[in-house]
Amino acid sequence: MDCKVRKGTIHYEVIGEGFPLLVLHAMGTDHRSMKAWLEPVFNKVEGFQRVYIDVPAHGRSAIDDHVKSTDDMLENLLDFIDDTFGEREFSLVGVSFGGYLAQGIFHDRRSQVKGICLLAPALHLKKRDVPERVILERDEDLLSSLEPDIRAAFETLFIYQNEAALTAFMKEIQPGRLLANREFLASDWKAKRYYLDEEPFHNVQTLPNSALFILGKQDYICGYKDHLFLLEKFPNSTLAVLDRAGHMLQIEKREVVQNLMADWLSGSH
């Protein structure tokens, strides 16, 4: 389905019935990357309606020429929320850049957001404290067989560069990469207008919302040390730092991530 918003359209897919979960994927892919690992959780947990969206400039969500910044993308998302949920409560699930957008949504629609789950999220920080890059498994023959574009993305994202990880990448991440608005993503937006005008949560000491934060100890893209303040900001939260997990922890540590999600969801009805 498509929803007309201020500066384009938001493409989305709704699965199930119950309390709404708005699900935001990472940069450079689309909503299918989230469905792949999240849907199996609902074999165990009932009562949630999943609203999977293609974030602006990704998948089948179109942007017009007025979209120049993350704030513009956020405006489109807020229009979608107003149109889809009205004044109803919902919870947020966001990965990486989708996690940063989720923080922006939370900041602007705090009265409606019941809970928030962030996986390896980007934060409102100009400088990140990230660990040294490590690769825990590397199949040279496999890597040498890949097209340059796929190989570059795969090597950047994964600390396990093996056949199982590649299979997941090709099934879950790559299809969305083919649809991403590369012209916009390659523009100067990231260098100049990536950070939201307003820092999320800056104007409140603590937040009572149910929260789950899942981080990779070997995530050299977004790190984990910068996120520890979230434990104090959200007293009703779980924060898990997974060893032997990089930025793609929902693939590299899928079962652990799914169990943490199921636990959070079962307590946040």
Image: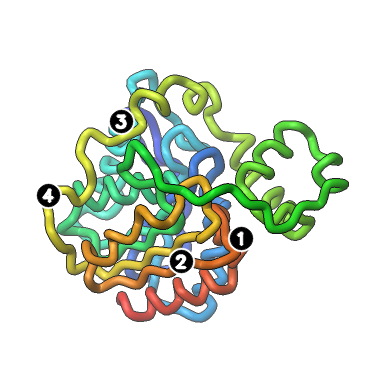
The C terminus lies in quadrant: bottom left
| Tag nearer the camera, 4 or 3 | 4
Q: Is 127 above or below relative to 210?
A: above
| Circle 3: element type | helix
What's the distance in space between the residues labelled 3 and 1, CA to CA? 30 Å
What's the distance in space between the residues labelled 2 and 3, CA to CA? 32 Å
What's the distance in space between the residues labelled 4 and 2, CA to CA? 26 Å
| Circle 4: element type | loop
Q: Which residue is mark 1?
A: 251
Q: Earlier in the sequence, mark 4 or mark 3?
A: 3
Categorize mark 2 by other alpha carbons within 10 Å: few (<14), some (14-19), many (20+): some
Numbered circle sitting on residue 19:
none
| Residue type indicated by callout 1 | Ile
Q: Earlier in the sequence, mark 2 or mark 3?
A: 3
Question: CB of mark 2 within 8 Å of CB of mark 3?
Answer: no
Where residue 11 appears, as percent x and y from the top left, is 45, 42
Q: Which residue is mark 3?
A: 72
Q: Which residue is mark 4?
A: 203
Let me know if residue 131 appears in the view.
yes
Q: Which residue is mark 2?
A: 241
The quarter holding residue 70 reads: top left
Let me know if residue 1 appears in the view.
no
Q: Earlier in the sequence, mark 3 or mark 1?
A: 3
Please name the residue shown 35% across and 56% down the image. Answer: 227
Categorize mark 1 by other alpha carbons within 10 Å: few (<14), some (14-19), many (20+): many
Categorize mark 3 by other alpha carbons within 10 Å: few (<14), some (14-19), many (20+): some
What's the distance in space between the residues labelled 4 and 3, CA to CA? 21 Å
| Circle 2: element type | strand
Nearer to me, 121 or 21:
121
